[in-house]
Amino acid sequence: MFALEWCEFCWSVRKMLRELGVDYRSIDLDSTAFQQDNLGGDIRAALQERLGSPTIPQVFIGGEYVGGATETFDAFNGGQLQPLLERHGVDYDRDMCFDAYSFLPRWLQTRSG
């Protein structure tokens, strides 16, 4: 996952992956390690050019592009993420059942009533 340390969408995807028990790697483009010579900015520009999307996070499973936070949540909720995890040999808790959007901060969640 290419992410930003301060991004609430990135936090939400990380929370969901942790809840599923997925061992993941987050490359935080705004971290100190990627600030020198604007390496993080260059990687982000390359991602946008390659994928056609400026959003962060950008999630990959086994090298296969999933999308940003909403695409990842939709893939889980729609049942497409689970076979992708299995196809790439990624362990996860197959008994977990939740609405992936529940991991978003409360101010972003849909309000009822």
Image (tube, grey):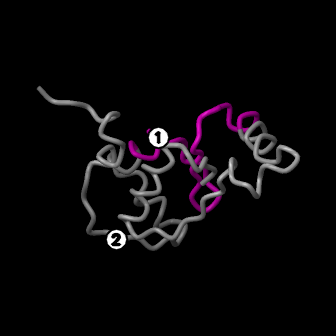
Residue at (73%, 41%) from the top-left corner? 44
Residue at (65%, 32%) from the top-left corner? 54
Q: Position of 52 compared to 78: left or right?
A: right
Mark 2 vs mark 1: which is more N-terminal? 1
Disc number for residue 71: 1
Q: Does residue 48 lie above or below 36 as drawn?
A: above
- Residue that protrudes farthest toward the front in the picture: 32
Quadrant showing the N terminus: bottom right
Residue at (25%, 54%) from the top-left corner? 98
Q: Does residue 98 lie above or below 62 as drawn?
A: above
Q: Residues within 10 Å of mark 1 (few under 14, many from 20)?
A: some
Q: How many marks?
A: 2
Q: Position of 35 compared to 17: left or right?
A: right
Residue range corresponding to the magenta coloring: 48-74
**Camera-side residue: 1 or 62?**
1
Disc number for residue 13: none
Q: Amino acid at mark 2?
A: Asp
Q: Which residue is mark 2?
A: 93
Rendered location of residue 67, percent (x, y): 55, 42
Residue at (36%, 43%) from the top-left corner? 104
Rendered location of residue 84, percent (x, y): 48, 59
Quadrant showing the C terminus: top left
Q: Amino acid at mark 1?
A: Glu
| Res 62 quadrant in image | bottom right
Residue 55 lies in the magenta stretch: yes
Q: Residues within 10 Å of mark 2 (few under 14, many from 20)?
A: few
Q: Does residue 86 lie above or below 29 as drawn?
A: below
Circle 2/circle 1 CB separation < 8 Å = no
Residue 19 lies in the magenta stretch: no
**Camera-side residue: 65 or 110?**
110
